[in-house]
Amino acid sequence: MDKAVIEMMARHFKYFQQYVRASISKTARNLKQAADDPLWTSVVDNPPNLVRTGRKHGYGLIILALMPITAFALGTWQVQRLDWKSKLMAKFEDRLVRDPLPLPPQIDPAAIKDFDYRRIYATGQFRHDQEMLIGPRIHDGKDGYLVVTPLERGNDDGSTVLVNRGWISKKFKRQEDRPDGVPHGKVFVQGLLREPWKKNMFTPNNNPQTQEFFFPDVAEMAKLTGSQPVWVEETMAESDLIKAWDREARGIPIGRPAEVNLRNNHAQYIFTWYALAAATSVMLWMVVRKPPADVARRVRQNREWQ
């Protein structure tokens, strides 16, 4: 290449460099710098503070604090219920071991609670024409009914009481299908004197017109049959499985055992509520003691920022 051409190209490149530098300097002079503002403060002179955004816990902490208190209160209430239920069952067990009493001719309904679970005996004739079936009732996984028959006693005043004779299978609903379960003549009944039952909100009402009974409403049944509002649950003479099978096969009502069958699950409830109180207390302590997050709940904010 010619030396003159090379020199010319070098001069043009030098001129280009000078032009670029001049343009950059002119642009820089036209831009306003932050330091040119007399009100501007450096971050060195006014350092930022670390602040936390939002509330620390809010309403969730209040709810979490109420949980162990409520669970502990319910556990304490169950302790009281366990004490009450244990004393009640002990009282009924004491009555069961006593000798059976003859059922008096006339009974004051208000006094029955003082003889609840007391063994009694009576004689008379069953009024099978006024028999009532309560059901459905499950016994050993099989569907059936409780047989309630008025017992007309042979005393002078002819008083009548209601006797829950026990359970029969559904296939023996008609009396014609269970002749062995419909005794005639004078009978001897031994059972437990019980307080009238209380209906819960989930049980439908009885319908006497269609002979549909879902729970033993003693007052209603007594009025329907002209009996005293007295409820006797017949018991089996002995706890014999073979005898129970024979009764079931022949349609003879299976009486209840002479024992207290009240549910007592309060000890389980006590453990459940106190365990829940302990667990929620630990959760509350962990939430309160938990250190705040470094990034999620902190921002940099200057003292002068609004």
Image: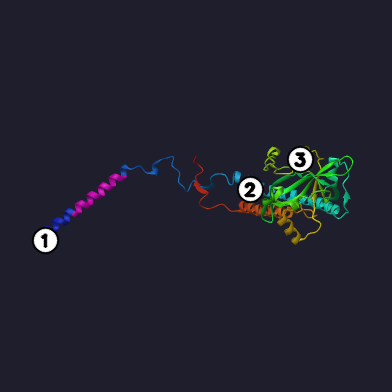
Q: Are marks 2 and 1 in contact (CB under 8 Å)?
A: no
Question: CA separation, marks 2 and 3?
Answer: 51 Å
Residue 3, which numbered label? 1
**Of the residues under marks 2 and 3, which one precedes in the sequence?**
2
**Which stretch is magenta?**
13-28
Where does the image place residue 272, in percent across and percent down from the top left?
Answer: 69, 54
Looking at the picture, which amino acid does disc 2 mark?
Answer: Leu
Looking at the picture, which amino acid does disc 3 mark?
Answer: Met
Question: CA separation, marks 2 and 1?
Answer: 91 Å
Toward which corner of the image does residue 133 lie, by quadrant? top right
Is most of the magenta stretch helix, strand or loop?
helix
**Camera-nearest residue between 136 and 31:** 136
Residue 221, which numbered label? 3
Left or right of residue 49, residue 82 in this image = right
The vertical placement of 283 against 217, above or below, is below
Q: How is the image coloured?
A: rainbow
Q: Secondary structure at mark 3?
A: helix
**Of the residues under marks 2 and 1, which one precedes in the sequence?**
1
The vertical placement of 93 against 225, above or below, is below
Question: CA separation, marks 1 and 3?
Answer: 134 Å
Give the residue number, with chain letter if any, for mark 2: 64
Looking at the picture, which amino acid does disc 1 mark?
Answer: Lys
10 Å neighbourhood of mark 1: few (<14), some, or many (≥20)?
Answer: few
Left or right of residue 169, residue 20 in this image = left
